[in-house]
Amino acid sequence: MLVQEIMTVPANYTSPQDSAASAAEQMQSLGIGVLPVVEEDRIVGILTDRDLLLALARQDRGLKELPIAAVMRPRVICCRAEDTIEAAAALMGDHQVRRLPVLDDEGHLAGLLSVTDIAVHVSEQLAGETLGEIAEYR
């Protein structure tokens, strides 16, 4: 089975110039915990709810004044829509991430793949093994 068969489409995203507050509002309203950061059709970072919380804890100013570029992680682990689920799960485990932005042939954001997607649509066993790798202390 391929990633494109189970990934979440469309993937919600934000831009580096948006405020951290707007990203937090988007995450809350959609019930999600991660947003790829996209600029000129390319992924330039990733933002999680944890990133926002940690940024808020270390800032004297609020999230409204804080641009996403100051909070996001610029190193993004991605997979391709044509990758197998097993390859994507291995990538998640290797890099200890629960969600992967999915890229199309041109390198644009095509969707998002989560461990939950794997559990629901493919295999609870594979999802459990992947979570075990993610949670492993390294």
Image (cartoon, rainbow, N blue to C red):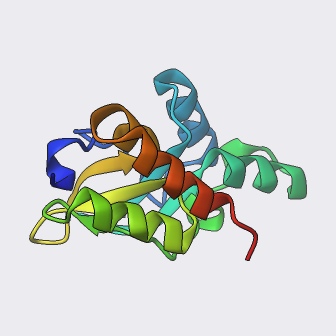
Residue 24 visible: yes
Q: Residue at x 15, y 52 (%)?
A: 1
Q: Is residue 119 above or below residue 55?
A: above
Can residue 42 be seen here? The reply is no
Q: Is residue 134 left or right of residue 34?
A: right
Q: Which of the 4 image quarters holds residue 8?
A: top left
Q: Residue furthest front?
A: 125
**Residue extending furthest top?**
29
Residue 63 horizontal side relative to residue 10, left or right: right
Q: Residue at x 25, y 44 (%)?
A: 7
- Image spot of residue 99 (x, y percent): 45, 53
On screen, residue 13 versus residue 84, left or right, reads right
Q: How many numbered circles are shown?
A: 0
* Residue at (56% x, 65% y) in the render: 69
Q: Residue at x 39, y 60 (%)?
A: 89
Q: Where's residue 22, x and y in %?
A: 55, 38
Q: Give the quarter of the figure containing the C terminus.
A: bottom right
Q: Is residue 3 above or below residue 5?
A: below
From the top left corner, tell me how far across and down residue 29 is, in percent: 51, 22
- What x and y, as percent, mark residue 18? 50, 50
Q: Nearer the viewer, residue 76 or 72?
A: 76
Q: Give the image quarter of residue 116.
A: top left
Q: Vertical placement of 88 versus 30: above or below? A: below
